[in-house]
Structure formats: structure tokens, C-alpha cells
Amino acid sequence: MCGIVGIAGRSPVNQMLYDALTMLQHRGQDAAGIVTCQDGRLFLRKENGMVRDVFHTRHMMRLAGEFGIGHVRYPTAGSSSSAEAQPFYVNSPYGITLAHNGNLTNADEISATLFKTDLRHINTDSDSEVLLNVFAHELQALGKETPSEDDIFAAVTEVHKRCKGAYAVVAMITGYGLLGFRDIHGIRPLLYGERPADDGGIEYMIASESVALTSLGFKVVRDVRPGETIFINADGELFTRMCTDKPSYTPCIFEYVYFARPDSTMDGISVYKSRLRMGEKLAQKILREWGDDHQIDVVIPIPDTSRTAALELANQLGVKYREGFMKNRYIGRTFIMPGQQQRKKSVRQKLNPVELEFKDKNVLLVDDSIVRGTTCHEIIQMAREAGATQVFFASAAPPVKFPNVYGIDMPAKSELIASGHSVEEVRQIIGADRLIYQDLQDLIEAAREGNPEIERFDCAVFDGNYVTGDIDEAYLQHLEDRRNDKAKGKSNQTLEVITDNTPVDMTGVKAEA
């Protein structure tokens, strides 16, 4: 999961790109990068760290130009080294820089072809560099000294034929313009917008979420369609074209559950409203299964992404909603952290209970999802220590049983607590008195209500149906070997890593597989 932005401006874009990346910081806290173009020269700054730490005044002053792209990263395919921070650059043809959100599922195959056939060298393990070189090769194969918009669209068409997986892309061709395109399924989000410039022209912006555009005063025009390419040339003229004859609108539903900001709208769906509907449907399920005598005294969200769903759930149940956990904003997202002990420690640092909201009460804790179960277990223990009589737990998403292969570094299948365990077994492992999950169909309806044109969502983490059709057990095993905690521990020996075949191994409960 990453955040991307590209701006074709009429004035310097360095500050705009910086501001946009801060609005997308939730999509990647591992690394950040910006590249700008002025008079045929590129100016690049990228490094590991948060946006505010990567870019200082001296860096910003060097990022000259009215065109540019930016990127914030969580590592998925590849490592977390600064060498793999984006944007990536290739000098031939023309000089191309690219930033990518998503994951190619056939990157290894393409990488071999790039070396043997296209005679291109790949310097990192990043699939984003692979994608850049595919695009560069297809553009170079056209043999044009000066590429037209038709040439650029033709190159992207070939990219779609060669690349499988998820990719939302912004790229800049030195001296020629800015482009953005989206994979043929539209798995990862991408929008574009415009605003009037001081000189009477129009500035264009392409970004992962609408909030990045609106915060800078851009009016959202629309989402980039699956398989579509947006190109703004050096003169500020905009061109669009569908670059595949097989588009399939299948956005990732986890964007609405967790990844996106609630004040964003993507693919015509308000993230905030979709989460309200998730809470409404979860409340209806609680009433069906637990009855009117559910014994819930108070509903408490696990900040931040579950707040919206929890609020509507409480309204539907007629139960008090309270903020029972105070969040430390300076601790990163825990589900990505390698190592059970590191995650356990970080949860305690990240959240602190308000004891008066727990003491002598039956508490329903609401989270957006349950992945490893580490966070849930720790939070439930914290609620009990704060004096809760009973601790119930609700997930606004169905059980996460399968790894995400489309650009989210979710754990290996063996580390997913719901994989191989029943709901009752998960309840025992996390230590809750009751546990309830959202139904998948209810989740789909909660999201789809915002845009009935979307007939299908990528729900692979819940049902194992991977929309690209190229994922098998061998691929998932290969992914597991790369993503599990042991593998990550080898790449970072400073972390204390404890792994086991049981998804959650620190609870003292040995569940049967």
C-alpha cells in the first residue's frame, strides 16, 4: 500500500507535492520521495522516513519545476531499504520517473524477460522498477524521437498486456509531460482533478485519494477508469484514452474498511458513508444473533479507522458510544510490524485506556478488522485491567483468511488468525467473552451502495478469489516464504521475532488447527 501524486502545474509544484504527500501519509510511513522537472532536468529527493523527516528546507529549494510526482511507501514486494524508495528513474528513453501503488503478481517472470529479451538491468527487488522498465521498453520500441500522446497510450496498452496484478501509476517523461494510469481491474485507487491557475491556465493533479486533491484546492474531475490513461503534455493539454479492451471494475474493498481516509471519496464511494453502513449492518447482525438482550453497556472503538462504524453501530443499538482509548499518534500501524513482540509492545505504547469508561461495564470493542489477532488480544487485556466486567469484540470486516497479493504487506496465511480457526477458536485465542464478524455480503453491500455501477469488489483477503486469475497455491507459498515473520526477521536482525505455526502465540492459549 502506497500513496502517489502527480501535478502538472503552472507554477512551482514542490510545496504542493509535499502538502499532498502529508495528506496521504496514512498510506505509507516507511519512505517518501519527490521528483520535479525544470528545463529538461530532474530534481530528486527520496529517503526512508515520514514526509516531514525526509524533506527539509534545503531539499525543497532544490526541487524546482512546474511538473512533478511524489510517493509515500509501505514496503511490499522488495525490501524496505532506501534504495527502493520511490520514485524510480530510468534514463532511456527520454528520461522517465515513475511512482507506483500496488503489486505486480508476475514481476519475477517479467524481470527475467526484461534481462534476456529487452536487455534491461533491474537494480532492486522492487516490482515498481520492473513496471517502470516495461513502460520504458515499450515506449523505446516505438522508436520516436519525439513521442506523441498516441505513442504514450500505445506504450501503456502494451504494459497492460505484459503486467498482471494491481498498479496505480503516476509517471513523468522529461520534457514531454505527466501521465497516470490504472490496471485493467482498477484494484488500487486513482483520481484526477483540476484547478484554475493564476495565469489563466489550468493545473492538473493525479492522486490516490480525493482528499489529496481537495486539500490543495483542486476540483475532483473523476476517477481514472480501470485500464485508462491520463496524459498532460508540457503545454498543459490533457488527453485521456482507454488502453485495454478488457476493463473490469473491481476495486479493493479493504480500501473502504481500513486503508483510506474517511474524508476521501474513491470510485464514487464515500469512505465515511461506507463505514457508517458497515456499522449499521454489523448492529443488525448483533441484534439477530445476540438478541435485544445483548448485555452491551457501552460501545468503544479502537481508534482510528473503526470510529465511524462504531458510532453508527452504537446508534443502531441504542447504546452509549464512548472514547475509551486515547491514541499516541507517533506509533506506526502495528499490523505491518514484523515480530509478535514488537507488535505487542507497540499496542501498549499506542493506546491507553480511560478507566472510568471500562470499570464494571460490559464493553463492546469495535475494530475495523482482525488480522493477526495480536492487537485485539492486547487491547482486550487492557480493557480487563481497566475494570471491564465482560469484553465483547466486533469486527467491521469478515474474517481475514488469505494474504493480500495486490500491494498490501499483510502477513503470510499461517499468521492470519482466522485462517484455519473457527470464530469460537479465534474468540478463545484473543480472549474475548463474545466475538462477532461482519458478513461478507453485508460488507459488499455497505460499499457498493455508494456506486451501484461497481458489480464486484476485490475481496480476496476474505474469500480467496483473486481477480487477476493468476494466483495459485504455489504463488501463495512463495509469498509466504517472503512475507512471514521469520523472513522479515532475517532482513532486520535488530528486531526480536517470535514465530510459530499458530497465528497468535503469545496468549497462552493453544488453539487446535
Image: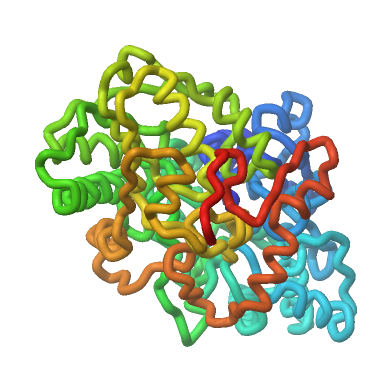
Kindly identify the residue that appears in the image at 39 percent across and 50 percent down: 257
For the point 51% across and 45% down, the residue is 373
> From the viewer's perspective, is 60 left or right of 363?
right
Image: 274 above or below 413: above
**Residue name at image x 63 percent, y 38 percent:** 29
Q: Which percent across, then down, holds residue 233?
A: 60, 62
Residue 101 visible in rendering:
no
How many numbered callouts?
A: 0
In the rendered view, how is the structure colored?
rainbow
| Outermost residue toward the top in this view | 356
Q: Is residue 122 visible?
A: yes
Frontmost residue, 135 versus 399: 399
Which quadrant is the C terminus positioned in?
bottom right
Q: Is residue 481 left or right of residue 221?
A: right
Instruction: Return the residue nearer the eye: 288 or 104.
Output: 288
| Residue 216 percent coordinates (x, y) | 46, 37
Q: Residue at x 86, y 86 (%)?
A: 117
Residue 25 found in image quarter:
top right
Viewer-side residue, 422 vs 185: 422
Q: Is 242 rendered above or below residue 62? A: below
